[in-house]
Amino acid sequence: MEDSIKPINPVFLDLGPIQVHWYGVIIGLGALLGLWIAMRESERRGLHKDTFVDLVLFAIPIAILGARAYYVIFQWDYYSQNPGDIFKIWNGGLAIHGGLIAAFITGAVFARVRKISFWKLADIGAPSIILGQAIGRWGNFINQEAHGGAVTRDFLEGLFLPEFIVNQMYINGQYYHPTFLYESLWSLVGFIGLMLLRKANFRRGELFLTYIIWYSIGRYWVEGLRTDSLMLTESLRIAQVISIVLILIAVAVMIFRRVKGYSKERYLDVSK
């Protein structure tokens, strides 16, 4: 049976000299859907509907550069010998943590220039970010990357997965954990949770911080299953270290802002 399994073609559209890859299409779809959700919510929260359009024009390209730079830096032994591969992002190699750091900085600068609360922007954008992550992981699925350790076909079928997922997890003669799917589902649950929590009228900034905590918990677990982790040492995975640090920072910031009275505004307030 395995002899007849063929991976999904990673090229979505072949125009001769120009190829459009599924990886980029899927990431773009996640970004567009997230932008639409943020635009609708920003109007409800008293911001101009184009606020997030303007932000995304800066944040997405900078986030992609940050995600790629982060990955390349920690894989420099390879890229120093193959500099031509540095720009081949369609083959994968976008580190989410690098993208988040770049997007965070971009958002902070944007908010300062526009004289808008950064925390308000972050709260509105948090569900969109995690939804984009949930969708974007399917780009890893197409590229057969970001998978976990070896498993059997029986194991995958025992998860009641569709056959196309099971078959795509057959890579170079071996089946692997679909860790892309685990993280995608975790992020999807996080998206639903954040959408529901909007009605809870959290203090400003706490919806975004909740996103950081939720995503980091899931990422820490999933990263422990992966076989392609960026490593700090032979036994220390960078993403797990970053996840722990982010959880601690998010909790500390939440407590600090409450103690100092910096989070008096609520999510449903319409003030800037």
Image (cartoon, rainbow, N blue to C red):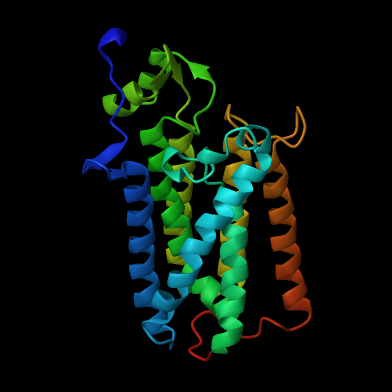
Quadrant in which residue 209 is drawn: bottom right
Q: Position of residue 91 (x, y in %)?
A: 44, 38
- In-front residue for pair 173/156: 173
User: Residue 260 lies in what quarter of the image?
Assistant: bottom right
Where 263 sits versus 18, above or below? below
- Residue lying at 29% horizontally and 29% vertically, measured from the top left: 8
Q: How many marks?
A: 0
Percent x, y of residue 100: 58, 58
Image check: 196 left or right of 167? right
* Viewer-nearest residue: 102 or 84: 84
* Residue 203 visible in this rendered orientation of the protein: no
Q: Percent x, y for residue 194?
A: 48, 63
Which residue lies at the image location 28% right of the left edge and 27% below the top edge? 164
Left or right of 79? Residue 167 is left
Residue at the spot 61% in from the left edge and 84% down from the top edge? 112
Residue 142 is at least partly visible in this image: yes
Q: Residue at x 33, y 28 (%)?
A: 165
Question: Which of the 4 image quadrants contains residue 34?
Answer: bottom left
Q: Position of residue 26 (x, y in %)?
A: 34, 48
In what quadrant of the picture does the N terminus appear? top left
